[in-house]
Amino acid sequence: MKFYLVAGERSGDLHGGNLISALRRIDQNLIFRGFGGEAMQQAGMEVVVHYRELAFMGFAEVLANLKTISKKLGQCKTDILSHNPDVVVLIDYAGFNLRIAQFAKSKGFKVFWYISPKVWAWNQSRAKQLKAVVDRMFVILPFEKDFFKKFNWHVDYVGNPVLDAVKAHRADSQFLQKHNLSPGNIIALLPGSRKQEVSRVIPVMAAVASELPGYQFVVARVDNLGTELYSPLEQLRNVKLITGSTYDLLAHASSAIVTSGTATLETCLFKVPQVVVYKSSAISYQVARMLIRVPFISLVNLVAGKEVVKELIQHHANPREILTELKQLLYDASYRQQMVEGYNLVFEKLNTGSASENAARLMLDYLAK
């Protein structure tokens, strides 16, 4: 049986890799090909295009790269026809993958979607588009199941792969020694994995770190971005950059500044008090303000259904406001404890077994039918 998978960013590659591994544990004869990255390749997929060629974020950035995106869409469609898979599995990455779903469905391929696009956040009518071209939807946030019910669509909630990854992590006992760090006063900086978001938030993080010289700020750098993006932080004596050890960093951090995205949920599950920040281009921000239909941007608050962590967005994501919140996280024990209690609520809502295993089993069951 042949699978064609499409992941367009780092988190999708990670979850795609885990999904492929789970599928192969059930059936070692499955064949995998598609768009992804190192995690999917290591799990056994032949990678046609790396996700770094597709990782554009924000409305303005997507518009600026329409030619590249269009070219990759054409390449993906051609490759699907050539591979002739039994199923096309799309992982998040809404704009690109919706077009692939429409194409695949029109050509008679079965279409599965793992990790739903965030249609509940804005332009909710897209749920109807998805329902028309997706055979089975596998969601990872508990409230998504109820959302799709509004459109008379039964989807499968399989649990959350981020929780799977956190549970599976075994902390490196030598992490502090390897990076010459002292325990107890480490502040994690998680600026994200996309070039646009990292370039905007790094100078702000650098300004905050310069105000707290007695703390060790450790940056979770990603290897798919150039080192020059991190230069404002590298110049500070109390800042260190590490690559590929985000979970080890969170296991030792006392607090964190996190760019909105999957990392907010990871930080929550490691029980690290955090302040969430987000900055986009002026055009992207104005468009988002008109379209967003949810009260929060962080996954932590969305899953909890209330404000657990402070969100500082656009002009509020400035050194002064971030520093004020960070000091409260560092020095106010009751405030920290209140946040951790909110984290416990999130954990309880997500703790439903292995998302990768559940999704793999369901996929193969549906294909067998």
Image: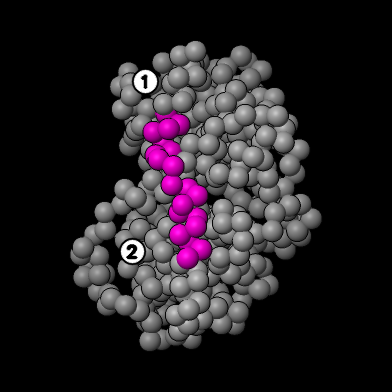
* Kind of residue at badge 2: Ala
Query: Looking at the image, which residue is at 20% across and 64% down?
Result: 174
Query: Looking at the image, which residue is at 37% across and 52% down?
Result: 166
Q: Name the element at disc 2.
A: helix
Pair 1/2: label in front: 2
Q: Is residue 306 in view from this perspective?
A: yes
Considering depth in this image, is 274 or 29 the residue closer to the camera? 274
Q: Position of residue 368 (x, y in %)?
A: 45, 14
Considering depth in this image, is 68 or 313 the residue closer to the camera? 313
Q: Position of residue 125 (x, y in %)?
A: 76, 38
The residue that mark 2 highlights is 251
Query: Looking at the image, which residue is at 31% across and 27% down?
Result: 25
On the picture, is 268 further left or further right than 62?
left
The residue that mark 1 highlights is 30
Residue 199's place in the image compared with 114, above or below, is below
* Label 1: few (<14), some (14–19) or many (≥20) C-alpha neighbours in 10 Å: some
Residue 108 lies within the magenta run: no
* Label 2: few (<14), some (14–19) or many (≥20) C-alpha neighbours in 10 Å: many
State which quadrant residue 153 falls in: top right
Q: Position of residue 164 (x, y in %)?
A: 38, 45
Q: Is residue 45 in view from this perspective?
A: no
Q: Quadrant of the N terminus?
A: top left
Residue 21's place in the image compared with 285, above or below, is above
Residue 147's place in the image compared with 228, above or below, is above
Give the residues in magenta. Answer: 341-360
* Kind of residue at badge 1: Leu
Residue 343 lies within the magenta run: yes
State which quadrant residue 19 falls in: top left
Q: Name the element at disc 1.
A: loop
On the picture, is 314 further left or further right than 260?
right
Label 1 or label 2, whichever comes before in sequence order: 1
Residue 16's place in the image compared with 331, above or below, is above
